Image (tube, grey):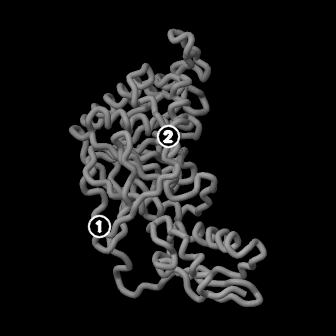
Amino acid sequence: MFSKDKILKILSTIIHPGTGKDIVTLGIVSDIKSDSNGISMVLTPEKSNDPFISSVRSTIVKTLKESLGQDAVINEIKIEPKVIVGKHAEKTREVLPYVKNIIAVSSGKGGVGKTTVAVNLAISLARKGYSVGLLDADVFGPSVPKMFNEENYRPEVKREKEMDIIIPLFKYGVKVLSTGFFVDPKDAVIWRGPMASNFLKQMIMQGDWGELDFLLVDLPPGTSDIHLTLVQEVPVTGAIVVTTPQEVALADAIKGISMFRTEKINVPVLGLVENMSWFTPAELPKNKYYIFGKDGGINLAEKMDVELLGQIPLVQSICEGSDKGEPVALNDSITGNAFFEVAGKLVENIEKRNKDLRPTHKVQINK
């Protein structure tokens, strides 16, 4: 058996990812018992749908075994959400009051380079002098931290008007928040839909975004709860759909465009970006090899009456830059300039959209 004080001391080293404070100080841990059956305790999170609590429980088991020995028996760790009496369970604040335009970056399927496009567009817009934020809402596969070479970054949290406010990373002129900043890069994110949606709400509501001209939201591939959560929580100015010229990608891109255009959602599609349009080897910069097909994005844009914002070639520097955390949009290269031009067209389309159409409202979806 182990003493309660010893167990508490070990638990005090575990940080709750959403607050930046240790779980003992937060008062999450209670009813600690250690007897012949093993160690047991109760976790009482402030919020009933705390997206981090399962991760905290796993960390507790791992940390106790590392500190007390692998033979230490963890009998039971119950999760019992705190019951709050009253109409207003938690403080709220106005959502993104100083963000002028919220842009969803989506794709019909994975593997088309959606996040690469989102990151390089964000940097290109910042280079043009705009204030820019990037919210990595690809909750289950966050790759934005790697592209910024900040996989070990952990956001600071400040207290403001009785609410924890998360400070985004600021790099390359862009404010960034990602699920990847709150979980170990080696760990898989295993959350149910409501937990993932709640985490997205938390990054939107509690992120210290400040004044922004553009907030780009990198959505998961396909259509999901995350997409619905976004359009229900904030008025999305417009969407970009990323595809490759490949037929299977184009077929899924049609679904993505159609989703935003449904009567219930009704978010304007600002344009299509065709990624990996052709392959150009470094030693033959003038050669183009259409390994995924030719002009698929052009044809789809015409068919769906969507503007093609640009074609991005498949070149080695894009892959290398993303892996090293040095996106190509930082440099005046052929590919960097391609993203710069797409960003310019995007701004033109947003200005036209805001001039010709009414502001988008948050979507009301009745179950």
- Residue at 59% across / 62% down in the picture? 191
Sequence-wise, the earlier of marks 1 and 2 is: 1
Left or right, residue 350 beside residue 18? left
Assign the N terminus to one quadrant of the image: bottom right
For badge 2, the amino acid type reads Met
Q: Position of residue 6 (x, y in %)?
A: 62, 83
Task: Tell me the quarter of the picture where residue 323 sits.
Answer: top right
For badge 1, the amino acid type reads Arg
Q: Which numbered circle lies on residue 147?
A: 2
- Residue at 60% across / 76% down in the picture? 10
- Residue at 41% across / 47% down in the picture? 217
Q: Is residue 23 above or below residue 199?
A: below
Left or right, residue 84 beside residue 356? right
Q: Is residue 225 above or below residue 270?
A: below
Looking at the picture, tell me which residue is in the foreground, 320 or 195: 320
- Within-10-Å neighbours for mark 2: few <14, some 14–19, many 20+: many
Q: Secondary structure at mark 1?
A: loop
Task: Tell me the quarter of the picture where residue 250 sits.
Answer: top right
Image mark count:
2
Q: Position of residue 109 (x, y in %)?
A: 57, 40
Q: Position of residue 283 (x, y in %)?
A: 57, 11
Q: Is residue 354 above or below residue 76?
A: above
Q: Residue furthest left?
A: 355
| Residue 237 visible, this angle | no
| Residue 68 visible, this angle | yes
Q: Which residue is mark 1?
A: 93
Q: Which numbered circle lies on residue 212?
A: none
Q: Secondary structure at mark 2?
A: helix
Q: Position of residue 152 (x, y in %)?
A: 52, 52
